[in-house]
Amino acid sequence: MAHGRRMSRGIATQSGKRVAASRYFLLFLLLVPLSPAIHADSEFTVQLRWEHQFQFAGYYMALENGYYREAGLEVELLEGGPHALRPVGDLLDGRVDFAISNSGVLLERMEGKPVVALAAIAQTSPIVWIVLGDSDIHTPLDLADKRLMLMPPMESAELLTMLRREGIDPDELDLIPTTLNLDDLIEGRVDAYDGYSSNEPWYLEHRGVDYRLLRPRDYGVNFYNDILITREDLIEQHPDEVDAFVEATLRGWRYALDNIDEAVELIHRKYAPNKSREHLRFEAEQLRELIMPDLVSLGHMNPARWEQIGAKYEALEMVSGPVELDGFLYEGRSETDYTWLKRTTLLTVAVMGMLALLVLHFVRLNRKLQHEASRRVDVERMLREKQEELVRLASTDPLTGAWNRLRFDREVRRELRRSERHGYPLSLIFMDLDHFKDINDQFGHAVGDEVLCRVTECVQNVMRESDGLCRWGGEEFVVLAPHTDLDQARQLAERVREVVLTSDSREGGSVSVSLGVAERTPGERLEDWLKRADNALLQAKDQGRNRVVVASA
């Protein structure tokens, strides 16, 4: 009898496996018809936004790896340039089927044009103001009275919005239409240049030009960029093909970002041989930070964020409201499929339940991934802070907080290059505390250290923001003074001498300093310049201390 029960259980188990297999087979048969039927060799053209570069790597990889061909699509990529900065006209006229735009495509939609945003590749725009590193421009407010080179408003809305948020009326600025020539910035014809953080900085670094970037996102303006767009009638007439094209494109982007070296090599060899591999790799690294594939799904678009972008366009009076997103953001065809499933048989309902369990599983997995991504961001931030602290410790004197010799050498050589390029004067002030050994001998080294810190503070109080103070060694200091001729440096040295002499006396008594001043002559070597300043300091000490001596040329 027990043997019979075991046989029954075995038969029931086998029967259960067959039933489960039948269910999976029915699920397969049910889901197969839901896959989009792609017409073979549907031909589409894509207008790129600019000349060939890594900015369009996902499209190249989708084409070269056969992702479009697997989807039954024949795709042609049209190189862009200045003519492609406003792609909507060609798109609506039917000259192209897809195009790449920026967030300004929302302006076209708000004006009633039937354009549709399919996917946002860059979650943050690379558009920035670029200024020279030795300029006095540090914030948007510093742009108020400067000459600004700007692309058309639709292409530069991020920059105009940033200025508006900082209380600057763009209509009152000296705006110059862009020439797309970076030499206009380098040679001083304009003070700020409208460029891409993924492109122009490479040229500047390659040419040894120091620069700064004013990023809109640092001032609360964060727009999408490199948005894949099409027109409504193409979606209505070829919905399956549009779905397939979007999926193949995002697949291409995933591959490009996971295999940057391979993508760079392909683009350099086949599409952009005029750009070096180093330039393309720089662009790839910058764009990956803006695309954020490890944190955000490729192509993701948030309706609430689009509404905020539209509201900012309204504030700039670039278009009148309201912001209507109905039909503007592409939703694909998956929701229609789910609606049909709900109207089918009980078996379909069961399948939906299974799909819901799968979705729940992936939601939980996604939450874990998001948690891990957040943890990694925190770790990376902590590592950056530690690295910055290490850099600071490696470049400053631990007692006084002034520059150390290593930092001084780096800064003085950089100022030498700037001085030679722009022709401005550059001076040094060597300073030595008088009778410092007596202070150490009489009061001890702790008091001596306190005196050194007090003198450092006095000197920094009279220095300009552009000056730098270095502890040269022991009780000897050096002041680096850019944009300063010999007479100005002498006056600065006198102020330093007076403020140290009249500072509040603490334990250790009053302190005086001797100073030597030297202006660099054209073509003079750094070593000779330092020696002249040091000799002037020695003369000041020989002449009785507590005085300033100017070095002869």
Image: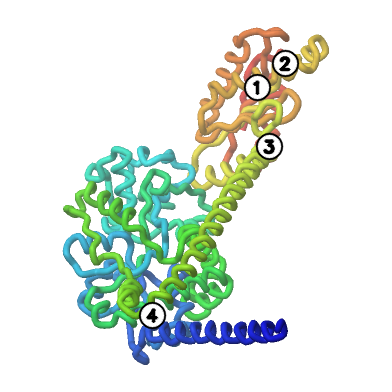
The residue where tag 4 is placed is 244
Residue 279: assigned label: none
Q: Earlier in the sequence, mark 3 or mark 1?
A: 3
Q: In this image, 537 relative to 256: left or right?
A: right
The amino acid type of the residue labelled 4 equals Ala
Image spot of residue 5 (x, y percent): 67, 82
Q: Nearer the viewer, mark 4 or mark 3?
A: 4
Q: In this image, 179 relative to 523: left or right?
A: left
Q: Earlier in the sequence, mark 4 or mark 2?
A: 4
Up-down: is 377 above or below 472?
A: below
The residue where tag 2 is placed is 434
Residue 393: assigned label: 3
Model colouring: rainbow
Residue 12 showing in the rendered view: yes
The residue under the point 39% across, 83% down is 35
In this rendered view, identify the residue nearer to me: 267 or 368: 368
Q: Earlier in the sequence, mark 2 or mark 1?
A: 2
Disc 4 from disc 1: Cα separation = 75 Å
Secondary structure type for disc 3: helix
Tally the numbered discs.
4
Q: Which of the 4 image quarters holds residue 529?
A: top right
Q: Earlier in the sequence, mark 4 or mark 3?
A: 4
